[in-house]
């Protein structure tokens, strides 16, 4: 029988999707997996598509600065510690892989008490609070290419990119458009704000959809759960052809949306960028201005420097309509972006990441938790 892995990955689509990706690869190699997820609606909705995977829900709340948010966080933290103890004791994993976020804390702390190998994955180019805290327990830290994390030894870090789900691949445009009810001919714009949706992008669509349709641009907008009503609006473009603006609250088949689109407008979460890359979809990224540590700006700038997107500040969102129309008319630019995206995707090496997890499992238990906590940085540590 294979080895047992515990993957902590709930809270956002950006954590849950790569966790599912890794779990499916481990299962295909004959191992066993359990995935720790949150009680949030977005987690529950996505996991419906994976009945063959074992999911465990735990309580928790994200860190916040207001008294109410802090109270909810610490209440969730202590509940998570108790639940984490039970999960680790019951599952008896050979390795724990955590994708950051508030759910990771309790499970990682109790796994470290048992001396289990801990691996941490950070998808963003600016590591979050949970990863910065949990790094002291980790024997392996997976980071985006070129990113450094203070007080983590060089030998601990691996650069394997973002594990994209198996079904997330580019499909023929004609077939994708047929599945989504989109016209076979013409320019399609996809608008989405990640698993949570984005009010600013939804509002932009509401204000500009008529002009976009009249300009010959069909729209497919994924608004986020509870952030609008599903439906289709139609207008006639300047050539007398019918154009459609389709809105959905949640989409289980984002690979079809991105494969059908000529261009996407999106936030700049690491998961969204990886999915745009895998589906070879040029994009205009509008980083969420209130993201923790401004990590979406870091993601977007790096992606733009590689030639995979155009970046627009949210305070200049009134320029987005002109940007979209200009890119629609610049086919050479879209082709160049597509070529760049194919090269960028080579950095996402899920198979290598899973092979490395197998190696950690074979290596067996690590030092006790207090020695890991107290150890000083090794020579050659990243800064």
Image: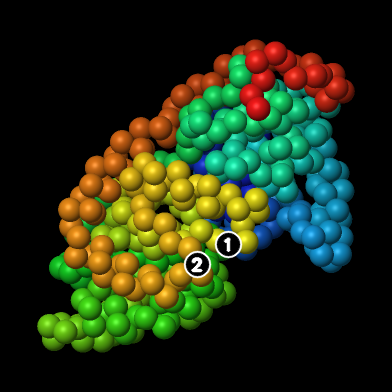
Q: Position of residue 67 (x, y in %)?
A: 86, 64
Q: Which mark is residue 314?
A: 2
Q: Which residue is mark 1?
A: 289
Q: Residue at x 58, y 49 (%)?
A: 295
| Quarter containing the N terminus | top right
Q: Is residue 211 left or right of residue 316?
A: left
| Quarter containing the C terminus | top right
Q: Examine the rendering and report whether any part of residue 112 can be seen.
A: yes
Q: Residue at x 68, y 30 (%)?
A: 150
Who is closer to the viewer here, 28 or 65? 65
How many other residues sit within 10 Å of disc 1, few (<14), some (14-19) or many (≥20)?
some
Lower sequence index among marks 1 and 2: 1
Q: Which mark is residue 234?
A: none
User: Is label 1 in contact with label 2 (beta carbons under 8 Å)?
Assistant: yes
Q: Residue at x 43, y 62 (%)?
A: 312
Who is closer to the viewer here, 344 or 234? 344
């Amino acid at each position: 029988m294979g080895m047992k892995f515990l993957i902590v990955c709930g809270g956002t689509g950006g954590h849950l999707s790569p966790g599912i990706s890794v779990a499916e690869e481990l299962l295909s190699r004959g191992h066993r997996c359990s995935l720790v997820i949150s009680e949030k609606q977005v987690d529950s909705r996505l996991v419906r598509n994976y009945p063959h995977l074992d999911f465990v829900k735990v309580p928790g709340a994200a860190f916040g600065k207001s008294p109410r948010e802090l109270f909810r966080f610490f209440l969730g933290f202590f509940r998570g510690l108790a639940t984490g103890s039970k999960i680790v004791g019951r599952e008896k994993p050979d390795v724990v892989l955590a994708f950051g976020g508030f759910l990771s804390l309790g499970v990682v702390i109790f796994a470290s008490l048992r001396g289990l190998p801990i691996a941490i994955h950070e998808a963003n180019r600016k590591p979050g609070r949970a990863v910065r805290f949990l790094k002291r327990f980790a024997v392996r830290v997976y980071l985006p290419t070129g990113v450094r994390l203070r007080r983590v030894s060089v030998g601990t870090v691996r650069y394997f990119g973002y594990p994209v789900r198996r079904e997330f691949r580019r499909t023929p445009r004609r077939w994708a458009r047929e599945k989504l009810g989109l016209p076979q001919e013409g320019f399609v714009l996809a608008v989405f704000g990640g698993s949570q949706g984005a009010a600013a992008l939804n509002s932009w669509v509401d204000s500009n959809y008529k002009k976009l349709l009249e300009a010959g641009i069909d729209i497919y907008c994924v608004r986020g759960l509870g952030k609008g009503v599903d439906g289709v609006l139609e207008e006639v473009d300047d050539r007398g052809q019918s154009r459609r603006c389709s809105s959905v609250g949640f989409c289980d088949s984002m690979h079809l949306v991105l494969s059908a689109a000529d261009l996407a407008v999106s936030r700049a979460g690491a998961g969204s960028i990886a999915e745009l890359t895998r589906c070879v979809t040029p994009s205009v990224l509008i980083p969420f201005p209130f993201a923790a540590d401004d990590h979406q700006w870091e993601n977007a700038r790096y992606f733009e420097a590689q030639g995979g997107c155009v970046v627009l500040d949210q305070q200049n969102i009134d320029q987005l309509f002109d940007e979209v129309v200009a890119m629609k008319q610049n086919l050479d630019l879209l082709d160049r972006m597509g070529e760049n995206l194919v090269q960028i995707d080579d950095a996402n090496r899920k198979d290598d990441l899973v092979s490395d997890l197998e190696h950690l499992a074979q290596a067996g238990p690590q030092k006790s938790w207090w020695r890991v906590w107290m150890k000083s940085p090794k020579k050659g540590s990243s800064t």
